[in-house]
Image (cartoon, helix red, strand yellow):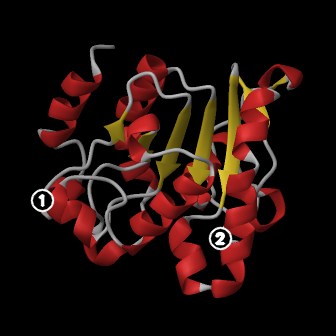
Amino acid sequence: MGGSLERIAAEVRACRSCELHYGRSNAVPGEGAADARVMFIGEGPGFHEDQQGRPFVGAAGRFLDELLAMIDLQREDVFIANVIKCRPPGNRDPRQKEIEACREYLERQIAIIQPSIIVTLGRYSMARYFPNAKISQIHGQARKIEGILCYPMYHPAAALHQPSLRRVVEDDMAKIPDLIARIDDFADAAPPEQATQLSLL
């Protein structure tokens, strides 16, 4: 069940594995470089993403573009995806069954891209690698899991809603080039058990 990123995108756009497909305008498979060293995983599409079929194109996306520019990267250099590929009604939080329905797509994307570092944006993508952790306690702390450095950050939208987090997000982003340079210094941690309960802080 591998295939190309284009094939996965086509499958995502035709997907009816959960109820979210009923309300979508466009599924949002993800986009970026097939050989990206850095992969960002957010939570789910919002209004603008649903309209355009592209990830991070609203206000949080503009902030993400600014963050990338801080470390001399552009969207074309990285890959950006979400744990769910369709917008939840009213931008509510993703539900576990929806995350599970999209899990295979995300796993196949990761397998093709083989990034050096996965940056999780927000608590729902964080829970994939750091089950039951609190983002307020572990943001900015990298751990290597199955050969990939996993690095939790606050979602850019959180910094827009809470201006006090903006500097935190900027500081965490600024560490990424050094983490990539030191990636061989990290020992593999034990693979996480899949989270059943997600931390809300």
In the figure, 193 relative to 43: above or below?
above
- Check residue 22 in the rendering and tell me which mark sits there, or answer none: 1
Q: Is residue 161 visible?
A: yes
Report the side of 2 relative to 11 (left or right): right
In the figure, 57 relative to 128: above or below?
below
- Check residue 40 in the rendering and tell me which mark sits there, or answer none: none
Report the side of 92 relative to 4 (left or right): right
In the figure, 171 relative to 164: above or below?
above
What type is the residue that disc 1 sits on? Tyr
Report the side of 193 relative to 82 (left or right): right
Crowding near pointer 2: few (<14 within 10 Å), some, many (20+)? few
Q: Earlier in the sequence, mark 1 or mark 2?
A: 1
Secondary-structure class at tag 2: loop
Q: Residue furthest front?
A: 72
Which quadrant is home to the C terminus? bottom right
Q: Rounded to the nearest whole Å, what is the CA distance between mark 1 and mark 2?
A: 27 Å
Image location (x, y in percent) of residue 182: 82, 28
**Residue designated by label 2:** 200
Crowding near pointer 1: few (<14 within 10 Å), some, many (20+)? few
* Residue 89, picture quadrant: bottom left
What type is the residue that disc 2 sits on? Leu
Image location (x, y in percent) of residue 15: 17, 40
Image location (x, y in percent) of residue 45: 32, 60
* Residue 14, picture quadrant: top left
